[in-house]
Image: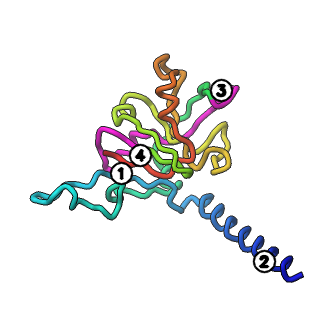
Amino acid sequence: MIWYKRRAHLLLACLAFWGCIAAALASDDSVVLRIYAAAPARPGSAPEAVSKSKASGPLAAAFSMKFLKSLPQQTFVAKTPWYQDPVKFTGPLLRDVLAAAKVKGKVIHATALDDYRTSIPFSDAQDYDVVLAYQMNGETLTPKNKGPLFIVYPYDSKPELQTVRFYERSAWQLKSLQVE
C-alpha cells in the first residue's frame, strides 16, 4: 500500500511539473526564442579567452511569443515533405526577427528542443521569405505539434526551394538561434 501511495504522489508531482511547463510555454509573455551572437574579440585578448562560459556566445536577445506576434506577420501555403496536404504557415519573417535582435553574420545555427541542429546561411533570411511559424492551418503550435516555433521556407514560391537542401534547413520545436 505504501508503494502505491508513493507512486501516486510521484505521478501527481510529475503531472504538476509538466502542467507548469505547458503553462509557461503557452504564455505569450514567456521566452520562447533565444538568439545568441558570436562573442566579439577584445583587442589584445587571446582567442581562447573569449567567453568560454557559453559555447553559443553571448545572449543577444530573448523574445516572447507576444513580441514575435507584434512583428509584421507573413502567411503562406506550401506543400512540405512532412504533410500530405498543403499547409498554411503564419509567423514573422526570420529577417525581421534577426533585425530586432540586431544581429548579423554569415551562418545561423538553429537548435530545437530535442537538440536537433541545422545551419542556415544568413543570406537565406534576406533572399527568401523564411518564416518562424507559430501557427499551422490557424492552430497555435505547441511542442507536441512542432512548436512553439517552426522555421519554414516558402517552398512553393520557387522551384529551387523544393529540394532536400532547403527542407533540411527547416527546424521545428525551435528554441534558439546562434548567429556567427
Q: What residue did someone put label 1 on? A: 101
Q: Which residue appears farthest toward the left when viewing the image?
A: 44
**Are the residues at dot 4 and dot 3 in contact (C-beta closer than 8 Å)?**
no
**Depth check, front residue: 70 or 133:** 133
Q: Position of residue 126 (x, y in %)?
A: 36, 32
Discs 4, 1 touching: Cβ within 8 Å? yes
Mark 4–mark 1 Cα distance, whole angstroms, equals: 6 Å
**Which residue corresponds to mark 4?**
97
The C terminus - image quarter: top left
Give the secondary structure at mark 3. Answer: loop
Specify the amino acid type for callout 4. Answer: Val
Q: Residue furthest top?
A: 159
Between circles 2 and 4, the one closer to the viewer is 2
Alpha carbon distance from label 3 to label 1: 31 Å
Q: Is residue 72 above or below residue 87?
A: below
Q: What residue did someone put label 2 on?
A: 9
Sequence-first tag of 3 and 1: 3
Which residue carries the number 3 mark? 86
Mark 3 and mark 1 residues within 8 Å of each other at the beta carbon: no
Going from N to C along the chain, the mark reached first, 2 or 1, is 2
What's the amino acid at mark 1? Answer: Ala
Callout 1: SS: helix
Instruction: Kindly check if marks 2 and 1 are in contact, taking CB atoms under 8 A apart as contact.
Output: no
